[in-house]
Image (cartoon, rainbow, N blue to C red):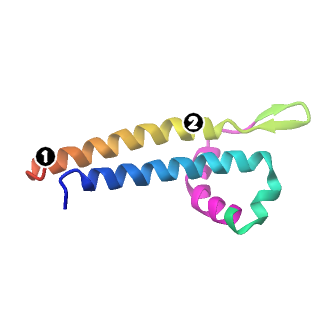
Amino acid sequence: MNRLAILDIVALLFRLYWYILIARIIMSWVPSLYHTKFGETVYNLTEPYLSMFRGFIPPISLGGGYLDVSPIIAFLAYHFIQVGALSIIRWILITIGFM
């Protein structure tokens, strides 16, 4: 296996999940999309991660509605998780002499 293949695969998986998170946010603007097979899959993949943030960041009341800012914090945390995980994997691969 190519030396960078492991790191590339993990980076690709992080990127794919990033796009799934973006799809979830776009779907929140068109709620009828949740009732499709694609919508159900996106919801099931993202809800465990997003619900962690919704638990401690309450929505902001805007007159008759609410603004959920937890996805913004979730995206910021996701970036740091991605950078940290890729750095740790790179360090492990270097340490074991794989890179």
Query: Which disc number belongs to residue 73?
Result: 2
Q: Amino acid at mark 2?
A: Ile
Can residue 57 be found in the magenta stretch?
yes
Image check: 65 left or right of 69?
Answer: right
Residue 88: image location, x then y, percent: 25, 45
Tell me where residue 42 sits by quadrant. Answer: bottom right
Which residue type carries mark 1? Answer: Ile
Whole-percent x, y for residue 1 in the image:
19, 62
- Above/below status of 48 relative to 19: below
Q: Is 15 one of the magenta-colored residues? A: no
User: What residue lies at 43% left-to-right and 50% top-to-bottom?
Assistant: 14
Q: Which residue bears the numbered disc 1?
A: 94
Q: CA distance from mark 1 to mark 2?
A: 32 Å
Tell me which label, 1 or 2, sits earlier in the chain: 2
Magenta stretch, residue numbers: 39-59
Local SS, label 1: helix
Height in image: 39 above or below 77? below
Quadrant housing residue 72: top right
- Between 84 and 16, the residue placed more toward the observer is 16
Q: Residue at x 13, y 48 (%)?
A: 99
Q: Main secondary structure of the magenta part?
A: helix
**Dot 2: few (<14), some (14–19), or many (≥20) neighbours within 10 Å?**
some
